[in-house]
Image: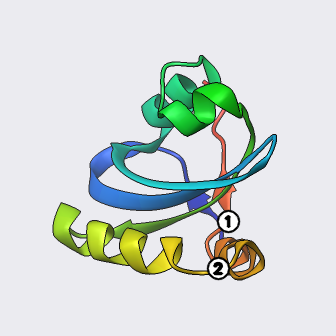
Amino acid sequence: MTQPLDADTRWYLYLLECQRGTYAGITNNLAKRYQAHCAGKGARYTRANPPIALLGAQPFTDRAAASRAEYQLKQQTPSHKRRWAKQWPVQLDAD
């Protein structure tokens, strides 16, 4: 099942494939945050290592749950993070 990329009241844990590695973060507006990363206005890591693709995003009902999941994901190896992302594929909507 593919998750639509839209802004709603949910929070998302997302994983980016970047030029040198992966980046995990949380947001309540996936499209806006991904655009910020691509425009060089996101996190310091993605400014230095621009994103290549949005690999996956898991929805959560609140920020606290997304933050806990982000912490757990960041403790994993890059290969484990990529396997996680395959469970939560994201479809970029063309507006």
Query: Where is residue 17 shown, x and y percent of the image?
Result: 74, 51
Task: Give the number of marks.
Answer: 2
Q: Which residue is mark 2?
A: 84
Amino acid of disc 1: Pro
Q: Compared with residue 41, is residue 18 higher up or lower down, i.e. above or below?
A: below
Q: As rendered, which of 24 and 92 lies closer to the eye?
A: 24
Q: As rendered, which of 75 and 62 lies closer to the eye?
A: 75
Taking the spot 58% from the left edge, 19% from the top edge, the residue there is 40
Amino acid of disc 2: Trp
Specify which label sits upstream in the sequence, 1 or 2: 2
Taking the spot 55% from the left edge, 26% from the top edge, the residue there is 35
Res 34 quadrant in image: top right
**In the drawing, what numbered circle is on residue 89?**
1
* Element assignment for label 1: loop
Taking the spot 43% from the left edge, 80% from the top edge, the residue there is 72
Query: Where is residue 22 shown, x and y percent of the image?
Result: 69, 55
Horizontal relation, residue 47 to residue 30: left or right: right
Query: Where is residue 9 shown, x and y percent of the image?
Result: 22, 52
Horizontal relation, residue 54 to residue 27: left or right: right
Name the front one of labels 1 and 2. Answer: 2
Q: CA distance from mark 1 to mark 2?
A: 9 Å
Query: Where is residue 54 shown, x and y percent of the image?
Result: 68, 49
Q: As rendered, which of 32 and 95 lies closer to the eye?
A: 32
* Element assignment for label 2: helix
Cβ atoms under marks 1 and 2 closer than 8 Å: no
Horizontal relation, residue 42 to residue 66: left or right: right
Q: Residues within 10 Å of mark 1 (few under 14, many from 20)?
A: some
